[in-house]
Amino acid sequence: MQENMPDAQPQFQNSVDVKLDYIQRDLREMKVDIKDIKTDFVNRREFTEALNAIRDEISPLRRIIYGIVALMGVAVFGAIFKLVIK
């Protein structure tokens, strides 16, 4: 039994070394990911400016769609009003 004990120690040490290697590799990958996030980060001001630009581009289209919907609503309301008065 005691002869097996010295063999168990190097196996345990090898397991710890493998786990440490995995942890070190994961830490290196995390550092790279953090650097990527820092370089690709968009701050609130840039995001707001981009959002306002998109809103400005969509504004005329929004007005056209609201106008069409309003005309359809007036047509439906007029038809119902005509049926009620008749």
Image: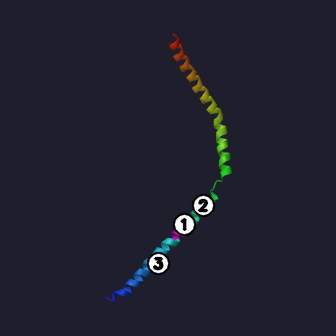
Give, as a three-letter code, the residue at label 3. Asp
**Disc 1, SS:** helix
Identity of the residue drawn at 55% across and 17% down: 78
Residue at mark 1 to residue at mark 3: CA–CA distance: 18 Å
Identity of the residue drawn at 54% across and 69% down: 27
Instruction: Estimate the x, y position of residue 63 in percent, counting from the top left.
Output: 63, 30
Q: Is residue 65 magenta?
A: no
Question: Which quadrant holds the N terminus?
Answer: bottom left
Instruction: Estimate the x, y position of residue 83 in percent, counting from the top left.
Output: 50, 13
**Disc 3, SS:** helix
Give the magenta-colored segment's residue range: 25-29
Residue at mark 1 to residue at mark 2: CA–CA distance: 11 Å
Give, as a three-letter code, the residue at label 1. Glu
Q: Which residue is mark 3?
A: 17
Q: Which mark is residue 36?
A: 2
Give, as a three-letter code, the residue at label 2. Asp
Residue at mark 2 to residue at mark 3: CA–CA distance: 29 Å
Reading the chain from its start, which is encountered first: label 1 or label 3? 3
How many numbered dots are placed on residues in this image?
A: 3
Q: Observer-nearest residue: 67 or 21?
A: 67
Q: Is residue 26 magenta?
A: yes
Q: Which mark is residue 46?
A: none
Q: Badge 3, how many Cα within 10 Å: few under 14, some, many 20+? A: few
The overriding secondary structure of the stretch rendered in magenta is helix
